Image (spheres, rainbow, N blue to C red):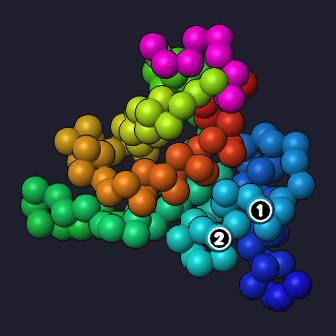
């Protein structure tokens, strides 16, 4: 295993610990390629993950939103994220549309990104974030 792979697995382990997951980091993780490519980082001091958008979003003031920060969800956050979508369904019963809605709600509620900005995120970033959030247990549990 390369040093880059080892470093990525170590970072994923730290993320799992911070988000309360009892799992062994693996290369088939939804997080692995993002961490290895430097698109997903972990800030140990603030216990947050930072995702670098593949397609930055231009804001009204001309600045670019390049990074979103996510922390562990609270019960209130999860209620907002899952409202009207999950109920008592298992992860296997949640479809891609449900995951997309919950991903966008997570960006609004936890990352603090305004709805009118989240609406402009590209599919590839929504897909990557959806995989990360699913693995971290935001959509079930």
Circle 2: is it few (<14), some (14-19), or many (20+) Cα within 10 Å?
some
In this rendering, is residue 138 above or below 18? above
Q: Residue at image x 53%, y 71%?
A: 39
Which residue is nearer to you in this view: 127 or 49? 127
Asked which secondary structure carries label 1, the reply is loop
Which residue occupies 68% across, 43% down? 136
Mark with earlier residue (1, 2): 1
Question: Magenta segment: does it hold 90?
Answer: yes
Inspect this view and state whether residue 130 appears: yes
104 lies left or right of 90: left
Residue 141 lies, with reference to residue 54, above or below; the image says above
- What quarter of the picture does the C terminus occupy? top right
Q: Position of residue 101 (x, y in %)?
A: 41, 32
Q: Nearer the viewer, residue 71 or 98?
A: 98
Q: Is residue 85 magenta?
A: yes
Instruction: Compute the Cα span from label 1 to label 2.
Output: 9 Å
Q: Residue at x 19, y 63 (%)?
A: 58
**Which residues make up the magenta segment?**
84-92
Residue 97 image position (x, y, % from top left):
44, 33
| Quarter occupied by residue 49 | bottom right
Left or right placement of residue 93 versus residue 23 in this view: left
Q: Mark 2 highlights which residue?
A: 33
The residue that disc 1 covers is 28
State the residue at coordinates (58%, 27%): 94
What label sits on residue 127 in the rendered view? none
């Amino acid at each position: 295993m390369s040093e880059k792979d080892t470093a990525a697995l170590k970072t994923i382990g730290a993320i799992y610990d911070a988000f309360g997951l009892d799992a062994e980091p693996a290369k088939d993780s939804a997080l692995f390629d993002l961490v290895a490519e430097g698109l997903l980082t972990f800030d140990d001091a603030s216990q947050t993950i930072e995702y670098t958008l593949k397609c930055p979003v231009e804001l009204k003031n001309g600045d670019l939103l390049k990074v979103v920060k996510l922390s562990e969800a609270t019960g209130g956050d999860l209620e907002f994220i899952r409202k009207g979508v999950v109920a008592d369904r298992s992860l296997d019963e949640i479809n891609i549309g449900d995951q997309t809605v919950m991903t966008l709600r997570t960006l609004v509620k936890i990352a603090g990104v305004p709805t009118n900005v989240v609406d402009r995120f590209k599919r590839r970033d929504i897909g990557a974030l959806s995989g990360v959030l699913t693995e971290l247990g935001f959509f079930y549990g």
